[in-house]
Amino acid sequence: MPTEPTAPAAPDAPGPVPDKVRFDGVTKRFGDHTVLDGLDLAVAPGERVTLIGPSGSGKTTILRLLMTLERVTGGVIHVDGEPFSHMPSGPSGRGGRGGRGGPGGPGGKLVPADERHLARRRRHIGMVFQQFNLFPHMSVLANLTEAPVHVLGLGKEEAAERARELLALADKADAHPTRLSGGQQQRVAIARALAMRPDVLLLDEVTSALDPELVAEVLDVLRDVAATTDLTMLCVTHEMGFARDISDRVLMFDGGRVLESGPPGALLDDPGHERTRSFLRSLH
Amino acid sequence: MWDMEAARAALPVVLSGFGVTLLATVLGFAVAVVAGLAVALVQRSAPRWIALPVRGLAAFVRSTPVMVQLFAVWILVPGLNALTIGVLVLGLHYATYLSEVYRAGIDAVPKGQWEACAALSLPRRRVWRAVILPQAVRNVLPSLGNYAVSLFKETPFLSVITVNEMVHEANSFGSTHFAYLESFTLAAVVFLLASWPTSLLVRRLEARLAH
């Protein structure tokens, strides 16, 4: 599905519609430990990709690289066809756009992105964390309006309006997050990410810290998000039922590489590798 | 022997000194709170050529006696009045302690909070002001209270540079009336009455913040 050569290329773009996210030979090492090893990965706009695999296989690192919480050791990440982990060097580098080479083309030399470049480019990416990471000293409503007000420049009322549309916790709006159940906290965190209207949503084991009986309410919210938006989603999860429901494609990771990939039905029901089979068995 | 008459005469003198003591405490601690935060932030995120000298200076101030510093500044900086020098020296001395307190408080804010800020693209200033510092200060509020009490109890050092705080007044009353016992006892009681309830308050705050 992602490589489908659909719609003719726009006149100014060489080739097909640029991938939403593209990893070109991305390597990530922590000291001597190689977590990602020359990873190539393309995600189409609006595609839902689920990353599965044993812990330590590099799935979460992919999300963290995209959220700029980690920096690549080698290779380049592109978002919307433009360099994301890197930026063009030279005096015109600050603008980043309008280079002669076209998006992702062989224009100027690329250098690792500085904080400014990352801060500008990551605005369209949102992330939900395993541990929620809500701001504990702020009310639920303030958690949801903080970034829309101070990053997007929305008025307080407008931001509060947006928050109310995203979250049916009306009576909890003034409560502090610690007063909520884990499931409610994670729903607040999802709403907080969506309030920034991202194009890409990263979900990092969002139900792993929850008591089993709270998992369903969070997954229901995410199913709803998947059904009603055209967000590109990258999801690391051990919930195979959820992966099956929302994914266009499932990638099985092992040792920093993609072992196999395919539509969820095919990969989860009839994996090609013994490693995948034993991993899936281990989840039950 | 305890002379009730002398004690009665000493009381207003000692209390007038207490006003100065209180003023020095409040102003000195205000200097310490602000300068301590500045030192903590500089050490954390300023470029090395600023951070290193500041760290060295802070270590120097922290490891020399406050009395020596008072004398040194008093002698080397003639234009300023004694109370101003006292407030600045005591304040900056405590700032070096408080910078460590802030550092611990900042370190205690979970990494996930920084990551949430990055995921929301919050600008750096906003990250500090709205997310990190409120939590860091909350973490260390009891420590700050304890240092405030401790600074209060070190204000008598200011008497050596002629600041007319409470112990200075008690001492001069004692020497003119030969009533050291009465004047110093009164000063000690006033110190006790002021710092003990404050310590209790700090402890209650500590309990409340611990949830």
Image (spheres, rainbow, N blue to C red):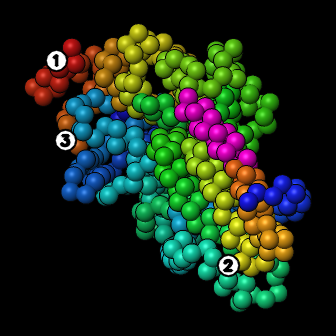
- Magenta stretch encompasses residue B196: yes
Quadrant of residue B84 within the rendered picture? bottom right
- In the rendered image, residue B81 lying in the magenta stretch gets the answer no
Q: In the rendered image, is residue A222 in sight?
A: no
Taking B181 as reference, is A172 above or below it?
above
Which chain does the numbered disc 2 sit on? Answer: B
Tally the marks.
3
Q: Position of residue A270 (x, y in %)?
A: 18, 17
The secondary structure type at the circle numbered 1 is helix
Mark 2 and mark 1 in contact? Answer it, CB < 8 Å.
Answer: no
- How far apart are the alpha carbons under marks 2 and 3? 63 Å
Which residues make up the magenta segment? B193-211
Query: Which image quadrant is residue A104 in?
Result: bottom left
Q: Residues within 10 Å of mark 1 (few under 14, many from 20)?
A: few
Disc 3 to disc 1, how far (Cα)?
Answer: 18 Å
**Is disc 2 placed on a helix, strand or loop?**
helix
Amino acid marked by disc 1: Arg
- To which residue does mark 3 refer? A255
Q: In what quadrant of the picture does the N terminus of chain B appear?
A: bottom right
- Residue assigned mark 2: B70
Residue at the image position 64 percent from the left and 44 percent from the top: B199
What percent of the width, then of the height, locates residue A136? 58, 33
Q: Which residue is mark 1?
A: A281
Q: Which numbered mark, 2 or 3, is in the foreground of this view?
A: 2
- Percent x, y for residue A75? 33, 56
Q: Give the residue displayed 39% in from the left and 16% down from the top.
A: A211
Mark 2 burial class by Cα count in 10 Å: few <14, some 14-19, many 20+: many
Instruction: Residue A159: tell me if it is visible.
Output: yes
- On screen, residue A249 versus residue A166, left or right, reads left
Q: Residue at x 48, y 20 (%)?
A: A182
Near-viewer residue (B108 or B205): B205
